[in-house]
Amino acid sequence: MIFYAASTNSGATVTKLTHIGAVVRPSGQKASTYDRLLKIEELFPVTPTPIETTDLREFLPAGEIDRLLAARNDVQLVSEEVTTALVTAISQLRPTMSPVIDWLRALEGFSGLGFSETELLWREQRDAANVGLRIGGFSPTPLRAWRRPAEGEPFIAGVVPYPRPNGEAGRQTPTEAPSQPAARIREDERSPAPDEGNDQSHDRNDRPQDEESQPVLSGLVPKATEARLIEHDARTFPGWRHMPNRQVHIHTFTDGDRRMEIVNVDASGVEAKTGADLIYYHVNTKSFVLVQYKRLHRRTLSIDDRLRDQLARMDDLAKLNQQPSQPDDWRIGPDFGFLKLADTMAHETPADRLIRGLYLPSSYVGILLAQNRTRLGYDTVDRHLSNKQFIEFVAHGLVGTVGITVEQLQEIVNGLADAGDSVVVAEDHSDESTAERQRRLRSRSAR
């Protein structure tokens, strides 16, 4: 919480609570022998107006406000009792801040995932959504604010909608009227660089824009109702509303001009699921990349008939690919199907970081299997793509399909769901040209 002191016209000093936020990783970067930099990764203004400290006194134990103000121009840790009292005061004095407080509590309350079959699948689904967001250049921050959904629901169903710190935080996201646009906020949170550890701040874009094109990063309410699916179908995948015995959850992220929709298509019941798949679909170029997740056990994966069947299915999909006829359609190779050998079982990964793993192009895996190998993993595969390498290849359009239609892609998604897989589709909507896309990526890399 940030307090700011200002002088009034009469010369008196008035101190106000102006911002609240969260420190997700409290250890901080070492700044000297004894000090560390404290990084506040989420910071929201108190709206519609800051709160004067005189109004806070009735909520806090005697003397606490004076103790806080005595530490002016410094960082001070406060007790859980004082924190709770301050949050209660903000909720009562500024009811419009309730969605912000709810989101911060969800951010703070996440205690990690275990190793049950459901939680392992949630890890994979979370990582798939995270990869899709990073490819598109969107921040994975909202994935950290998560509450455990009902058993059998996908990970994306538990993502808490990102609040709007613009004085409209109290307005609900479109629950009663799901065909309305997603809730908007004024922060433009760009994705950190797609490396294995992502402890970087997010860039801000402060250019003036009108209400409809404000930089935004928003979330639809997780439950996908019939009306919302109909609206979604009209944009990209006609017919998805006719999916009996499946759950479809949609979450939307946007940075103003561009939008990404994370769609989770799930077979009903955990027992029907065999793993997660990610399809990153770049709507403007009509190109997609498929990633099938495979869990490593002690750094290795046993090759079985199911893996061979999945690779054969990828080979069948490859036959749909066409030769490029335009410069923008050129790729470094025909592969658009990959295995991610994910180290899901190793340890808990923060929600905004990627699971360590090996990305293997399907054609490369075919060569390995032709050598009668029985296992794949860190100790048996000499070459692979890392998270960073894979994301950069896809983000720059160097990997992906050419000439495969939306209808064919829909059949692929349906086929994966029919096979019992949990499918995460990251739809990247953008009107930027290839040149504009390259400039955006290069400018981000330079920063």
Image (cartoon, rainbow, N blue to C red):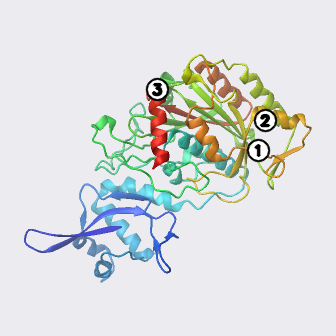
Disc 1 from disc 3: Cα separation: 43 Å
Position of 12 relative to 341 (above/below):
below
The residue wearing badge 3 is: 231
Mark 3 crowdedness (10 Å alpha carbons): few <14, some 14-19, many ≥20: some
Q: CA distance from mark 2 to mark 3?
A: 39 Å
Identified by mark 2, the residue type is Tyr
Q: At label 1, which amino acid type do we have?
A: Arg
Mark 2 neighbour density, 10 Å: few (under 14) some (14–19) many (20 or more): some
On the question of residue 264 being in view, the answer is no
x and y percentages locating residue 113 in the rendered image = 64, 57
Q: Are marks 2 and 3 in contact (CB under 8 Å)?
A: no
- Residue 364 - label: 2
Residue behind mark 1? 383
Whichever of labels 2 and 3 marks the residue nearer the N terminus, that label is: 3
In the depicted structure, whether residue 329 falls above or below residue 260: above
In depth, the one of 280 and 199 nearer the eye is 199
Residue furthest toward the right?
Answer: 372
Residue type at mark 3: give it. Glu
Image quarter in which the N terminus is found: bottom left
